[in-house]
Image (tube, rainbow, N blue to C red):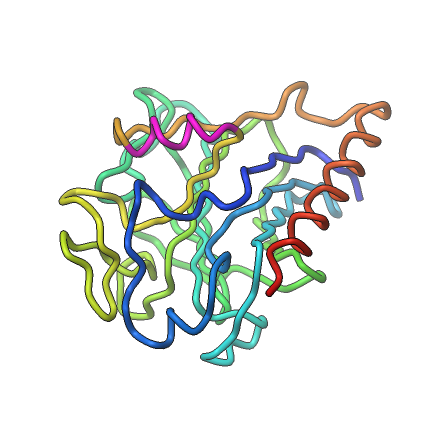
Amino acid sequence: MGVLFLFQDPVGDDQGLAYLYPRAALFQEAGEGYADLLALAGEEREGRLVLKVRLSRYPNPLEGPLGFSLSTVVLWLDTGEGGEEALLPGLSTPPGQGWEVAYILTGFGGEKRTPTGERTPARVWREGEWVVVDTGISPGPYGYYGAVGLFDPFASWYLRPTGPEGGPWTLGAPPGSPPVVDLLAEAPLDQVKAYQTGILKPLRPKGFALKRESLLAFALGGASLLLAFLLRKP
């Protein structure tokens, strides 16, 4: 098993641009942080790329088999030239940096998608506080896009939609806003800019594989994530 990268996302930025969460008791009673993305890590296992996502909290009122049920994580990978530039309604990639494969992670399983609409099951499981997906592809110098929204089993990306005034089951957000409350961005201003412009920049590992001296930084990053998780617990 080899560590490839670790991207950390700011704590407590799961509000979009001042989005209002749905008013149904299911969401109000869950508290905060269940859609707050803390980190995305990549590892090589048996020659395949495995991605690990860390959320701040994992409430499970709907009894999802993976131990959470209110959030949906979507990861898009830019693995080649060209690709699909539309990520979600109201959110796109920069020109020429489109995605070739995407993975949807929910508390009820995983799904792999292509820009042509092909859908196949993806193997997803829990490793402690991490949600893990086996991509089935070889590691490479890819670009990574990520977003977290609220789980909706009937929506096209399993993401609860937005509306100008919100509602019991709808996020309150300006017209045309993407249906996600947190974006993978290592700096808070990068996320704000992505919401304002509708363009999300990919994160790309520097040097692809972590060097030996970088493993200490990876360990320290894991410790900071643990501290953030403990601080967010009620």
Q: Residue 20: x, y in percent?
A: 28, 55
**In the image, what residue occupies the spot 59% across and 54% down?**
133
234 is within the stretch colored magenta: no
Q: Residue 95: x, y in percent?
A: 30, 20
Q: Nearer the viewer, residue 10 or 211?
A: 10
Q: Nearer the viewer, residue 138 or 186?
A: 186
Q: How many marks?
A: 0
Q: Find residue 209 and report its image quarter.
A: top right
Q: Is residue 18 left or right of residue 216?
A: left
Q: Residue 6: x, y in percent?
A: 66, 35
Identify the main secondary structure in magenta.
helix
**In the image, what residue occupies the spot 33% across and 23% down?**
94
**Quarter of the figure with the C terminus:** bottom right
**Quarter of the figure with the N terminus:** top right
Q: Residue 38: x, y in percent?
A: 57, 45
Q: Is residue 100 left or right of residue 23?
A: right
Q: Nearer the viewer, residue 1 or 32?
A: 32
**In the image, what residue occupies the spot 34% across and 30% down?**
194
What segment is highlighted magenta in the picture? Answer: 187-195
Q: Is residue 172 left or right of residue 142?
A: left
